[in-house]
Image (tube, rainbow, N blue to C red):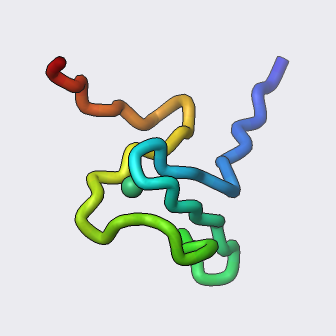
Amino acid sequence: MSATIVPPTERECERCGRRDRWDDETENWVIDGRRGSPTCIHEWDINGSYNPVAEST
Ligand SMILES: [Zn+2]
């Protein structure tokens, strides 16, 4: 069997609510909308390669 890795085309920050979408032409994330904080340490709701920093409670 062969596994096909499909990269995510959308992501949303779980902290500030910012949404990005992937642009194939520029191969970059494009901000979709105006929500979000510029000082936010974005924590994207993408499963897989991203390792969120553990929060201290
Ligand atoms: Zn954020």
Residue 33 figure quarter: bottom right
Count the marks.
Answer: 0
Tell whether 47 sits left or right of 56: right
Tell whether 57 sits left or right of 13: left
For residue 26, above or below residue 14: below
Residue 52 figure quarter: top left
Q: Quadrant of the N terminus?
A: top right
For this rendering, which residue is in front, 56 or 54? Answer: 56
For this rendering, which residue is in front, 30 or 27? Answer: 30
Residue found at the very far right of the displayed protein:
1
For this rendering, which residue is in front, 4 or 16? Answer: 16
For residue 13, above or below residue 48: below
Residue displayed at 17% across by 18% down: 57
Q: Position of residue 4 (x, y in %)?
A: 77, 35
Q: Is residue 45 visible?
A: yes
Q: Position of residue 27 (x, y in %)?
A: 58, 73
Residue displayed at 66% across by 48% down: 8
Residue found at the very far bottom of the displayed protein:
26
Q: Position of residue 35 (x, y in %)?
A: 51, 69
Tell whether 46 sits left or right of 38: right
Residue displayed at 25% across by 31% down: 53
Q: Quadrant of ligand 1?
A: bottom left
Q: Is residue 28 visible?
A: no
Residue 36 figure quarter: bottom left
Residue displayed at 29% across by 58% down: 40
